[in-house]
């Protein structure tokens, strides 16, 4: 029945008259893309199956050329995600992940909620030094993985919901607010600030941090608590965990050779990622360098590569959805929506226009597999429409810049940073759509209410 619903949806859209202003290819690709997303949401099939069937349909119907369909597999940032999986395995295999996890549990491990807050706080602390939230997720993921597995919550034995699923969801949600807080926390942020300058709007490091500070601090306390209520871990209180962690650390003894090597490689990678923008260093090449050193020192082996099946599955489905999203934009589908948005808000007061533009900008991220792609496609268009309707320019620009980050958890593929968590095995795609949708609504509500009032006060 679910498969029938997906097929009916796709066929109805495909054979409906092509809207004026769109070419048939754009409309047909939209039919394939939205059907593949719908299939995952209603649990008709896994995201991997849905994406490969969507790719087949797009190529066989000549909606996409072969080159367009497979273009995602050559993207450097997608390869970075895959290497991050392997680096995470090295951190766990070397024992460094276990040591870090026990140190965190020793300090914050009396409750699962305390662990979630500690992970997000660490993310917010390191975020200003990371121009890539994908690279940052590559740092956080192995720590969260170790926290989960060393607390007895594993994918392999069916105990993922004991603690791991909750921590993975919290860490992924935390990236949306840490990326919103700092101008340098996500690659698209400086690009958006530069685009705003073309409208005469000056967004500085200080004005960005000040404008985001109050709503982000509120969300720091709200997001883990809300996830705790709607997607709770089976283990809630762990009063004995700090003591057990301390004993485990004593049993582990001194830092081993493999841990020292892993630590050096990890710190080296982080350092190069931090300065990558200043010295034009490719982040993916840095990740491959780290992977090569781990293999050279026998911390990782070829067998480890073979056993990391989630990495390959993630590469396939994300590369496919990314290519389809890019082609939707290239065919003019996103621009067509933008034109209709400008017509939709015509004649309304600036407050209503501001509200509508922000909500549409957040929700339209369902069609994007890249925050940067959405900003490049829609930021200037939405900002221009808002300013023409009388919305204060600084307010409109800042809200759109922030929304580019706080809407990222709306889908499993909504950010390349999400994909590492989505491929962990701890989270199901349908769970991310549900919980991610709720967190996106929460983020949007806080920013549109408290955030708007704060921006009007400080800008």
Image (cartoon, rainbow, N blue to C red):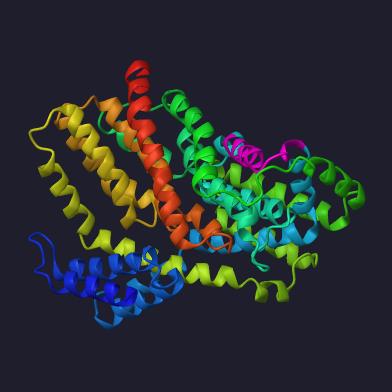
Residue 240 in the image, given as x and y percentages of width and height = 80, 42
Q: Residue at image x 18%, y 52%?
A: 337
Image height check: is 308 above or below 186? below
Q: Main secondary structure of the magenta part?
A: helix
Image height check: is 214 above or below 123? above
Residue 253 at least partly seen: no
Q: Nearer the viewer, residue 150 or 112?
A: 112
Find residue 237 and report its image quarter.
Answer: top right
Which residue is at the far bottom?
60
Image height check: is 107 above or below 10? above
Find residue 93 and report its image quarter.
Answer: bottom right
Residue 53 at least partly seen: yes
Q: Quadrant of the C terminus?
A: top left
Residue 376 in the image, given as x and y percentages of width and height = 31, 48
Report whether 230 appears left or right of 84.
left
The magenta span reads 107-124
Q: Residue at image x 13%, y 49%?
A: 340
Image height check: is 242 above or below 90? above
Q: Quadrant of the N terminus?
A: bottom left
Residue 289 in the image, given as x and y percentages of width and height = 66, 60
Q: Residue at image x 70%, y 64%?
A: 292
Q: Residue at image x 20%, y 66%?
A: 26
Residue 218 in the image, given as x and y percentages of width and height = 48, 28
Q: Is 114 included in the stretch rendered in magenta?
A: yes
Report whether 438 appears left or right of 290.
left
Report whether 254 appears left or right of 383.
right
Q: Is 37 included in the stretch rendered in magenta?
A: no
Find residue 34 and report its image quarter.
Answer: bottom left
Q: Nearer the viewer, residue 195 or 32?
A: 32
Report whether 21 appears left or right of 134.
left
> How many labels, in total?
0
């Amino acid at each position: 029945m679910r498969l029938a619903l997906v097929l009916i949806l796709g066929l109805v859209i495909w054979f409906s008259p092509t809207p004026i202003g769109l070419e048939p290819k754009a409309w047909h690709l939209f039919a394939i893309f939205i059907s593949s997303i719908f299939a995952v949401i209603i649990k008709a099939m896994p995201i991997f199956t849905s994406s490969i069937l969507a790719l087949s349909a797009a190529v066989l119907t000549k909606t996409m050329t072969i080159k367009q369909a497979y273009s995602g597999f050559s993207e450097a940032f997608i390869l970075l995600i895959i290497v991050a999986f392997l680096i995470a395995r090295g951190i766990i295999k070397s024992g460094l992940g276990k040591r870090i996890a026990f140190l965190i549990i020793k300090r914050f491990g009396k409750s699962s909620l305390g662990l979630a807050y500690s992970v997000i706080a660490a993310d917010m602390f390191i975020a200003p030094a990371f121009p890539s939230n994908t690279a940052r997720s590559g740092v956080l993921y192995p720590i969260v993985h170790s926290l989960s597995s060393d607390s007895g919550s594993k994918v392999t034995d069916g105990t993922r919901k004991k603690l791991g699923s909750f921590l993975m969801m919290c860490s992924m949600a935390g990236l949306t607010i840490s990326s919103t807080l700092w101008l340098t926390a996500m690659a698209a942020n400086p690009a958006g600030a530069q685009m705003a300058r073309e409208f005469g709007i000056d967004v500085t490091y200080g004005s960005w941090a000040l404008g985001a500070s109050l709503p982000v601090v509120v969300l720091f306390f709200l997001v883990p608590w809300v996830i705790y209520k709607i997607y709770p871990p089976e283990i809630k209180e762990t009063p004995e965990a700090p003591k057990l962690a301390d004993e485990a650390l004593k049993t582990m003894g001194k830092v081993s050779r493999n841990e020292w090597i892993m630590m050096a490689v990890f710190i080296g990678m982080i350092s190069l990622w931090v300065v990558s923008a200043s010295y034009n260093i490719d982040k993916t090449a840095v990740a491959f360098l780290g992977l090569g050193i781990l293999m050279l020192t026998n911390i990782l082996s070829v067998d480890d590569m073979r056993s990391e099946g989630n990495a390959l599955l993630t590469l396939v489905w994300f590369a496919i959805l990314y290519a389809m999203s890019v082609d939707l934009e290239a065919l003019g589908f996103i621009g067509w929506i933008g034109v209709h948005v400008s017509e939709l808000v015509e004649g309304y007061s600036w407050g209503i226009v501001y509200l509508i533009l922000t909500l549409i900008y957040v929700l339209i991220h369902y069609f994007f597999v890249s925050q940067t792609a959405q900003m490049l496609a829609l930021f200037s268009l939405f900002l221009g429409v808002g300013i023409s309707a009388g919305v204060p320019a600084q307010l409109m620009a800042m809200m759109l810049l922030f929304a580019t980050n706080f809407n990222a958890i709306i889908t499993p593929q909504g950010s390349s940073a999400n994909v590492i968590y989505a491929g962990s095995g701890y989270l199901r795609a349908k769970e991310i759509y549900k919980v991610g949708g709720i967190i996106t609504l929460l983020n949007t509500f806080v920013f549109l209410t408290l955030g708007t009032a704060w921006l009007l006060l400080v800008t």
